[in-house]
Amino acid sequence: MSQRIDNIPQRRAIIDRRALAEELDALEGDSTARLRQAATQRLKQALKDGRAEIERRFLEKPSSGLSTAAAGAFLIDQVLRLLWDFNHKRLYPNNNPTEAERMTLIAVGGYGRGEMAPHSDVDIGFLTPWKQSAWSEQIIESMLYGLWDMGLKVGHSSRSLDEMVRMAKSDVTIRTALIEARYIWGDTALYDEAARRFKTEVQRDTVRPFIADKLAERNARHEKMGDSRYVVEPNVKEGKGGLRDLQTLFWIGKYAYDVRRAAELVQAGLFTAHEYRQFNRAENFLWAVRCHLHLITGRAEDRLTFDVQREIADRMNYADRPGKSKVERFMQFYFLQAKRVGDLTGLFLAHLDEKFAARGRRFGLPTIRRSPRKLRGFVLDRGRLALPRDNFFIEEPVRLLEIFQLADKHGLEIHPLAMRAASRDAKCVDDVRDDARANALFLDVLTSERDPETVLRWMNEAGVFGRFVPDFGRVVAQMQFDMYHHYTVDEHTIRAIGLLSRIERGKLAEDHPIATGVFPNIVSRRALYVAVLLHDIAKGRGGDHSVLGAKVAHSLCPRFGLSPAETETVAWLVRHHLLMSDTAFKRDLADFKTIVDFCETVQSPQRLMMLLVLTTVDIRAVGPGVWNGWKRQLLTNLYDAAEEVLRLGHKHKGRGERIAAKQAALAEILGWDDAAMAAFTASLPESYWVAEPVGVLQRNAVLVRESGDVSLAIEAEPWSDQDATLVTVYADDHPGLFYRIAGAIHAAGGNIIDARIHTTRDGRALDNLLVQDANGKPIDESRQLARLKDSITDALANRVKLVEQLRARPLPGLRAEAFDIPSDVLIDNRASNRVTVVEVNARDRPALLHHLARALFQSKVTIHSAHVATYGERAVDTFYVTDLIGDKITNSQRIKALERRLLDAADAGKETAAA
């Protein structure tokens, strides 16, 4: 039995094995089946009572993860022993077993380690000396049926000793499970023989391949889980920095050094006493989180999703602080523990390198062949930067920056023992924050033309980054409690710097041609790098992080050595880093007032170029799947239009000239005669020609010509460049047309991301809508496209009741319900010269656009365009509207009524989703 199980207080309050054994001995039954059923029911009740007692203790001490896991293992131990004895004594007694009928029961895997979460599987093994006898098979089968009847999920094996050895040699998963095998009950001599044979026949002489296999398995698992310990919905068990990483260290330590407990890693020289305390603290915290997860969800759930994060923060007694909610404080502590797991892993692997790696090579790492000529006092150890003596950093703290600058300059890795010293001595960097050389070294790393992302991440892991730039230290491991951001603030920032470097080096030219093209024309590249570093640095301070971040920039930039002009540029970029995305995604770029207002803020082509690049890396660093072709197109359209205005003639063309150029390009593509082309161009207003790109104009022209006088024509075609499907509806115009189309598209499984609504001069509607599926991808299967068109046709013909159809749509998961997003309506008459701009902020939910468009129809307004932006759980829907005679909505009472109706529509949708 493990030491933690031995140290559980008042164990009989969890389960009293002696008393239960007496009860089981007293059971009566007229058949083996009835007797087993009676025993199973009694043990099932004992299991339930024991779990209730463990949970009661855990809720009293909600951070006691390891003791709770040990109590769970103790409870299962006692149940198994009682079931074993009952089977041997009452169901299948054998008073004189033969040598072949000896048998022992072992716990393997995590259960063998003496750790059990409330809903973990029970992993056990039955061992026999040779092939199983008929009596042994009866015992095993009866025990398994009993465990299943208790509702336990059992992972089991039954093997002879020879089979155990053979399978452990051939399968690293079985070998790993057996490393932690623990005696539960049965023949002790047989267990001792099994342990001896495993050690001599399996474990001996296989340390190196085992280590290599476990590290390869770990890397594959990280890749599968996102390869970052800073994802905002981490997997507590399998994710990077999670329990499995700690367990891997212990497995390797046990296999290579024959330690029995994690504490013995200190005697083995793998950890210092302080590092073991860190190991134990991280393990205890992660186990507490995992146990809470199981209890809240009622199942073996290991993903820390948004909907349970808040409840666990409550259970573990976190409290709100100014600018940071309790759930954000809880998750920040989680990520700090995950970071600590990563630090300990690096140190652990350094020791393994020294003892077990082949000469000149290291586990899972490339061989370094080139060396720098000058190391400024640092030394090379097997291709890695190392320290000549332990107090090297303390002697001259600027070396805490210099080691990372050298690593970047010469393409070297840093020895884990040097990283350990950097972590230990990081506080010394406080003394050189204002040192010009230290700041120059830091700026060299930040603006490196090689790989700043990797070295900055090392600097962050060591704790030097956050000490040298305390404002950055405040956002280390800070999560953003929303479904939009995939990473913590520090991880997002470092990824954005990496993307910036890759764009500068031309590595992302295919994805970001405009940003790549303008980069060589940016005058102050280091101002741009510093702006990317600082753009989110003021998050979590309880105010507008853009405004607060600009103040931080004014303070930090001179310290870094930037000129006053560069400082002003950085502060402006930080202050306005959301301007370009907000304008591109929430406003109608065909409205010239939008472009003029944007340019009044930007003011110069240099700022425009820098803002484009900053916006691009900021969006893409949010997480996988956030950047897409549609966003790229919108940003490109805004950039081109703004550049035209700012350069005043460099590419300047009047509105009429741009329209004429589009019409000429369309005529060349279509090949129509002059009369047909003139009829089509005359039928549509100027706003149509400004709003639509040539590719859409071509599709629309063909649809209009082919449809003739039919009352309704629909086209749906994937548009791969935009990562969406273009749906065009050409129909007789009538009030409420758009909200019916929006409802029909949602009922068919589509999400509208943009809509441009046009009316021909002869009173017909020509609406272009960009649609994606629920996963943010184009709808491209012929069956789905047909369903989309049929749904719109039926809705416009009133053949279906949209309200009922939308109610029948499956509701989304509850993750979004974890967020409180109050609905808000902004009505602006200054954003456009022609129309009123209505912006609705609300929690994203099924058919939100349909509900809002219907409210606008009921308010007797005309929609000219609609723009949909989603940020995780939050949606921002913007409508360009007029009254029925084409004028802006200016009456204050009507504005208030419109606002009230839209708020009701947004909240009604919320209530429907929550019902």
Image (cartoon, rainbow, N blue to C red):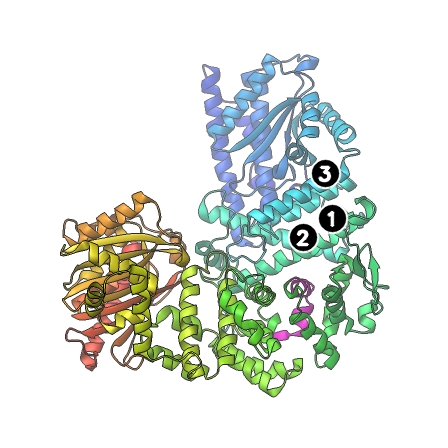
Is residue 460 inside the magenta stretch? yes
Residue 280 numbered tag: 2
Amino acid identity at mark 1: Ala
The residue that label 1 is drawn on is 263
- Give the position of the N terminus as an image quadrant: top right
Q: Residue at x 57, y 58 (%)?
A: 230
Please say if the residues under marks 1 and 2 sit with CB atoms less than 8 Å apart.
Answer: yes
Q: Can residue 28 be seen here?
A: no
Q: Residue at x 21, y 78 (%)?
A: 889
Q: Can residue 711 be seen here?
A: yes
Amino acid identity at mark 2: Asn
Vertical relation: 692 (above or below) 834:
above
> For the magenta stretch, what is the residue range?
454-471
* Mark 3 or 2, closer to the camera: 3
Q: Residue at x 52, y 27 (%)?
A: 23
Identify the residue at the far front of this view: 673
Q: Residue at x 66, y 12 (%)?
A: 96
Compute the Cα span from label 1 to label 2: 8 Å
Instruction: Tell me the crowding category of disc 1: few under 14, some 14 to 19, or many 20 or more residues within 10 angstroms, Cα based.
Output: some
The residue that label 3 is drawn on is 210
Instruction: Tell me the crowding category of disc 2: few under 14, some 14 to 19, or many 20 or more residues within 10 angstroms, Cα based.
Output: some
